Every structure is written in C-alpha cells, then in structure tokens.
Amino acid sequence: MARKVGIYTRISRDDEGDAMGVARQQQDCERLADLRSWQAVKIYEDNDVSAFKRNVVREEFELMLKDLRAGLIDGIVAYDLDRLARQPRDLERLIEIFDERPKSEFATVTNDVNLGTPDGRTMARIMVAFANKSSHDASRRIKRKHLELAQQGKDSGGPAPYGWRKDDRTKVDPDAARAIREAQQEILAGVRIGTIRTRWWEQGLGNPRAGTKRMAHHHVEHILTNPRLVGYRTYHGEILTGASGEPVKGEWEPINTVAEWEAVCAAVTERKLQQRPGKLLARKYLLSGIARCGLCKTKIRGQINQRRKPGSKATKYTYQCSVVNGGCGKVARVGEPVDKLIAELVLEEQREKAAALGAPIQQQWPRESELEAVQADINQLIEAEKTKQITVSTLLQLLPTKEKERDELKLDRARFYKDQKQAEAQVRSGELSLAEFFDLPVERQQEIVLHSLSAVMIHPAGRGRRIFDPSLIDPVWR
Ligand SMILES: [Zn+2]
C-alpha cells in the first residue's frame, strides 16, 4: 500500500511579488509525492503568515504535527525547509516526531534537506539557525525604525482607528467621536461594555468588520480607553514617554481631555476588579469528555439539570447524552455518584500500582557532565569561527557530530526525567484520599482518571429507576 503523506504549504509576506503562490507549491509537492509513489492524502496550508514571528500560531502546521504523531500520515512533503520551519523550536518538534517514528517519509521539492536521516537533521538545524538569525536582524532593523518614528510622535500606518477620518488619520471624524463620547458617558454612569457593544452593533457604530460579526468585547473596550484619545503615542500597547518623562504626544487631533479619559479608564478597571470574584467560569465536570453513552458511544458532558424542582436545595448535575452533540439523547445519569464511584476505582487501582512499584528514588541524570563537555566543545567551535580561527565550512564540518552527540544526550536526559516524573506522579495520586482528590482542580482530577481509564461507558437505566446502580457504569481500563 502506498505511503500516505501530508503536503505542507505556506505563503508568507516575503512572497509578495514573487510568483511562489501556495497553488504552485502544492502542485510541485504533489508531483514529488507521485514520483516517490506516495499518496498525498492531506494538504496543510498556512496562508500569509510568517514562520518567523514567534507569536504566530501556524494552525495547519500544528495539525500536521499532530497527524504525523498519531500516524494519520506517514510523512511530509514541503516545498523547502524555509517554508516548513524557520524557528529552531518548530524544527526540533518535527525532529522529535521523526525520532519517534523513524520510518516516516520526508521530502522537499528543492531537495535542500532530508529530515529522514540523522545527517539531514543536523544540516536542517544549521540552516534554520542561520535563517533565524538573518530574520532576526531584519526584524530588529524594522523594529528600531518603528520605535524611532513613535518617539517622534509620528503616527503608525494602517487603517484609521475608530474616531478618526478614514482618509486622514490625524483628523477627528466628528460622528465617530460623538459616539465614543456618548459611550464613555454611559460607562461612567455604570453601563457595561457589553451593553454598548450590542447597541453599537445594532446601530452600525464602531469598526465592525465588513458587516459580518459584532466587534469583540475587548475591541470595544479598547476604542473607549485607547490612549490615542488624548493624543498619547503608544508603542506595543504602552504609552511612550519622552526624555522629560512626559508622555509622547502624537501628531493627531485628540478626542478626550486627559481628565475625561482617565475617568473612563478608571471606571472600566474598577468594574473589572468588582467582576472578578463573582465571575464564575463554566463549571467543568470530572467525566466531561471521558464518559460515553452506552448506547450510541458519543462523548457525554456534564450539565446542570434545568428542570430542577423549585425549592430543591442542591444543584444537581447530570451526565447527559446530548442530541446537540450528535448523540442519541437517551442516556442520562446523575453525576455525583458516578464521579465518586470512578474516583474510588481509579484511586484504588493507582494505590495498588504504586505499592507494586515501591517508593521512587530521586536521582540525578548521571550523564550531566558529559553533556556539559559536549556543549563546551560546540561553544568553542562557534567562538573559533567568530574569531576567524576556523572558517565557516570547517565549522560546518565539525559541528554536526558534536551536535548529534549533544542532541542524543539531551533526549536521554529528557527520557530519564520523564520516566521519573511519571513514576512519582503515580505514587502521589495513589496516596490521595477521596476528599483530597475532589479538592484538586478538575483538570488535575481528569488527568489522574485518564491515567487509568480511557473512557467510562454509561449504560441506560430502565424507566423509573431511582437507585444508582454501579453495574451500569462501565470503566474502560487502559
Ligand atoms: Zn447516546
């Protein structure tokens, strides 16, 4: 059977003007997959994002890593390494998967690198390290320029913020400015941002995106509290101060006086502080997403029973197979006894396992000094190239072996501590009492349950049954 591969394409801002569109990358990758007799089963396409910007999440790239790890695809075809991974961190994550699944396939159209072989990985690391450096340099230059302009009070580019004229962002748009001032008055009178958000949406005010959704809450908040309203120049969200310590003033017309603006900011902040304790997050239930319907096998979530009798004291939650989530809707069980039963079973099992393992011995990874020595060698080589004692090509000849040694040691260390941590965690959860278990955050509780169980099947109870029957709750052990 043909090996199944995923094709990864990415278009970045650097590609502007260059004909290397996603469509062509994809075509070339498909042709290459054909040549190798691989079956291209999935296209992962990240559009118009830079792999260099650290905070940009490349969703499709992430998905591809997941699929590769899970074995849904057997390998990757990309146009070149640059498109696949420009950050060392991303590359290391990819390499980790290739380490775990050594039979995975890999190819690039430009044939610049092959992650399928150890030498190829070392080469890739070097290439990414160099690419990363030049991107950093370019990015640093651009940043410095931006900051310079900001310090002079120059406006940043881009579309005009709400409140200023679209054709000239230094001039106030009177209608928008009026809407902002009105909303600010409401805020001071105790109206919530959410209410203003709805009203603006109905009246077509603010900056809604081309008639689609309503603006996000934080977006409305930003419009009403933006330092730009008093003419303050910000840089990365912070008000810039000049040499005198005073805020840098921008070259545009303000909408608020400093006093007006500060009052609105204070009101918004105060309101947030008040809201915090009362603002309960949606409660999570222990077996949400772990429990499954015994009839249709759909995942079940916990929910508060809305049809509660008036006057009944405790709010009962149930695990309910839900038609909304694609289930049959025929199975429901009061949650609390199920949680208690499962917690008891899981803790019991983990106690037994922990007893069998014995107390874990805290140990240092024994090869730490070896790793330090290899790292020192690497540093020395890099330093030697910097001070021109050796050439780049000598460096690149010597570096790979050392780096490979280092990476293997690091992997060994990671495995060592991971095993230790897992053993510890098992002993610890085995020591928990039921009460201690339920005192943990739900996420922790779920983690412990998932350590022992892969699912909990909840079978239907007959009509009119009132007594909790544990035999209808079926834990699926790992
Ligand atoms: Zn069901």
Image: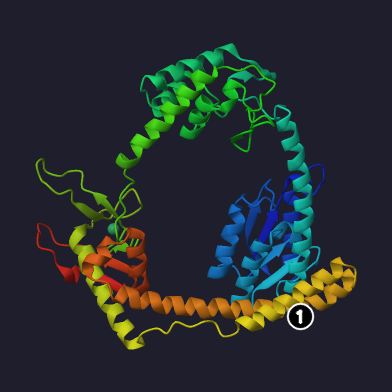
Q: Quadrant of the N terminus?
A: bottom right
Image coordinates for residue 236, horizontal then vertical, percent: 63, 38
* Amino acid, disc 1: Thr
Q: Which residue is most to the front?
A: 244
Q: Is residue 181 above or below residue 213?
A: above
Which residue appears at 32% of the width and 73% of the height?
A: 429
Image coordinates for residue 94, horizontal then vertical, percent: 64, 67
In front here: 242 or 23? 242
Residue 227 visible? The answer is yes
- Count how many numbered circles sit on residues in the image: 1
Instruction: Classify 10 Å Cα crowding around label 1: few (below 14), some (14-19), many (20 and above).
Output: some
Image coordinates for residue 195, horizontal then vertical, percent: 39, 25
* SS of the residue under disc 1: helix
Location of residue 390 (image quadrant):
bottom right
Which residue appears at 81% of the width and 69% of the height?
A: 383
Q: Is residue 77 left or right of residue 70?
A: right
In front here: 443 or 301? 443
Q: Quadrant of the C terminus?
A: bottom left
Image coordinates for residue 417, horizontal then vertical, percent: 50, 77
Where is mark 1, residue-wise? Answer: 401
Q: Is residue 362 above or below residue 23?
A: below
In front here: 208 or 406? 406
Q: Is residue 296 left or right of residue 23?
A: left
Which residue appears at 57% of the width and 27% of the height?
A: 227
Residue 35 visible? The answer is no
